[in-house]
Amino acid sequence: MSAQSPACQLLERQQDEYTALMVVAPPVDAWLIAQSAGVISGDLGVLSEWQAVGKQVYSPFALPENAVTHGEIVLFWPKAHQLGIWWLEWLCSVLPTGTAIEIIGEHSGGVKRVPNVLAERGMMCDKRDNARRCSLFATRTIALENTLEDAWQRFDALGLTLVSHPGVFGHGKVDEGTLLLLDSLEKELPKTPQRILDMGCGDGIISAWLAKRGHAVTAVDVSAFAVEATRRTLEANQVNGHALQSDVYSTLESETYDFIISNPPFHQERDVSYGPSQRLIRQAPKHLANRGRLIMVANVFLPYPDLLTEAFGSFETLADNRRFRVYVASRLGR
């Protein structure tokens, strides 16, 4: 079995030097899974892939003390530059000073900036390899003065206080699609409290907006960073809601909802991925009460109308600003 992703192909050239590889924030690559002792990731989908074959899996927000005590540690540099910095500083905070780590990534994803990032923090940098338009650097952890809390950003929008983190969708701003969705919800939602599932909650803006209007909100996201951001946003606005990590509906129980609301992602790092949105739409009727509705916003070019028709029989367009559309589909009573 050979590596598939470019970064993993570069890492494969170093294979003889690794004995117990622990990877941090990696892509899903079958070769990498086979070679690794374990994984640290904020993505539940990634953790599930590793766990399914018996590997050690850890979330950055639930890392047992001394969980990583041996082996080689490789950080895959993400396309969100500030998130890469967070991972680097996180490793410095949880590992003993002087622990060797390697950093790998694609040039198109910004890994060429890593030497400057290390230099700014007084960390050594050794360029170990370069191929497949990727680079591999080696460094060692140091004690840093700044704290991980510095990465959390608070800002105000729509009468709400939002708390966001690098790598979370909409970090530091409210995107146009969400604004169009909320405008539609203002007109579409009943004034009486509803049971609502916010699928792909991001920084929690939709959940907080709904909770402020008295609705019972369950917020889910595949990203541990997004779930923590939503929890902080709900707390900052003094509203109630339940936020949990789930790969679409994977960890939800049999409870149904009056509404499923979503601004679903269609990117995974630099790749377009429709898989989560397809599962969101196709499995929605099972998680909606009779007459329950799915309301979602999407870029106009995304192929969701056929999926909505297949899953629900029909749908309507609530809003269209030529860049985004808001769709609604109802589960008919049976």
Image (cartoon, rainbow, N blue to C red):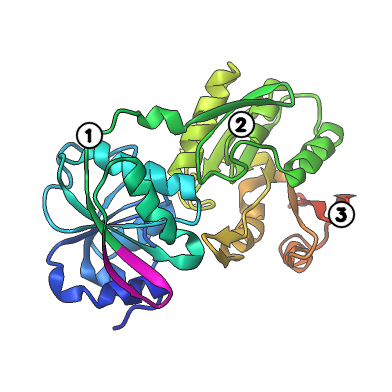
The residue drawn where x is 43% and y is 55% is 113
Q: Nearer the viewer, residue 190 or 51?
A: 51
Sooner in the amino-acid sequence: mark 2 or mark 3: 2
> Farthest residue toward the top?
238
Q: Amino acid at mark 1?
A: Ala
Q: Which residue matches tag 1?
A: 143
**Residue 200: x percent and y percent?**
59, 46
Q: Nearer the viewer, residue 226 or 71?
A: 71
Q: Are marks 2 and 3 in contact (CB under 8 Å)?
A: no
Gap between marks 1 and 3 measured at Cα: 55 Å
**Label 3 sits on residue:** 316
* Residue located at (47% from left, 44% from top): 82
Tell me where residue 186 appears, x and y as whole percent.
83, 32
The tag on residue 217 is 2
**Element at label 3:** strand
Residue at the bottom extreme, as displayed: 1
Query: Badge 1, how many Cα within 10 Å: few under 14, some, many 20+?
Result: some
Q: CA distance from mark 2 to mark 3?
A: 24 Å
Tag 2: residue type? Val
Q: Quadrant of residue 308?
A: bottom right
Q: Residue 169: x and y, percent?
A: 59, 45
The span shown in magenta is: 127-136
First in sequence, mark 1 or 3: give its number: 1
Which labelled disc corresponds to residue 240? none
